[in-house]
Image: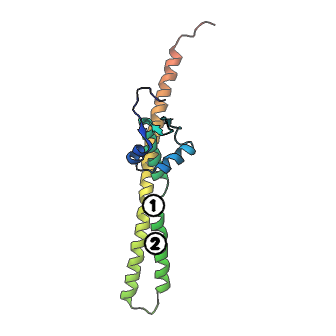
């Protein structure tokens, strides 16, 4: 809910604070991820602090649940390097050359693994936070149900 005395930010300020582009903010609005902002005379968008928090939450989820274009590029480039190493492999090559190629393959796959491991750890952290929240809600519900059982029934 927007507050009457709340300070508002223009789209450029929100973009700068949240690390997204103005185009991204308009996309979020178009897709219903953000409420339509208030407007100044002249149609300029005005965002609240709640809107900024929501954009930051969207970004956290996007980073957690998605894979960035940079990560995708790294994963695809790694596969290309592995294909090149496989194409260059010669059974008759010297052991030192085979070790060099294998070491390069190991480094490439370790980089891919690091990306996947990071996402997995972040997902595990989020899962734990959500479990804790659900456990808290369950405790609150149980307490409310105990209180409800103690309340006298009002006559009809």
Give the Cα distance between marks 1 and 2. 13 Å
Name the secondary structure under disc 2.
helix
Q: Nearer the viewer, residue 103 or 13?
A: 13
Q: Nearer the viewer, residue 92 or 48?
A: 48
- Residue wearing tag 1: 116
Name the secondary structure under disc 1.
helix
Q: Residues within 10 Å of mark 1 (few under 14, many from 20)?
A: some
Q: Residue furthest bottom?
A: 92
Q: Residue furthest front?
A: 42
Q: Position of residue 110 (x, y in %)?
A: 40, 68
Q: Nearer the viewer, residue 122 or 72?
A: 72
- Residue wearing tag 2: 78
In terms of image quadrants, where is residue 98? bottom left
Tally of numbered discs: 2
Quadrant containing the C terminus is top right
> Residue placed at 50% from the left, 21% from the top?
146
Q: Position of residue 75 (x, y in %)?
A: 47, 67
> Residue placed at 54% from the left, 10% from the top?
152
Kindly identify which numbered label has been placed on residue 87. none
Q: Residue furthest right?
A: 156
């Amino acid at each position: 809910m927007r507050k009457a005395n709340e300070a508002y930010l223009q789209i450029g300020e929100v973009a700068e604070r949240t690390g997204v582009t103005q185009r991204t903010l308009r996309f979020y609005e178009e897709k219903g991820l953000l409420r339509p902002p208030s407007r100044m005379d002249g149609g300029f968008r005005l965002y609240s602090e709640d809107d900024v928090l929501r954009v930051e939450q969207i970004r956290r989820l996007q980073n957690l649940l998605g894979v960035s274009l940079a990560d995708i590029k790294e994963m695809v480039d790694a596969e290309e390097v592995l294909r090149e190493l496989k194409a260059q492999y010669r059974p008759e090559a010297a052991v030192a050359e085979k070790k060099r190629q294998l070491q390069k393959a190991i480094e490439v796959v370790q980089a891919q693994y690091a990306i996947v491991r990071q996402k997995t750890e972040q997902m595990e952290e989020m899962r734990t936070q959500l479990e804790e929240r659900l456990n808290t809600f369950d405790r609150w519900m149980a307490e409310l149900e105990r209180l409800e059982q103690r309340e006298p029934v009002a006559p009809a």
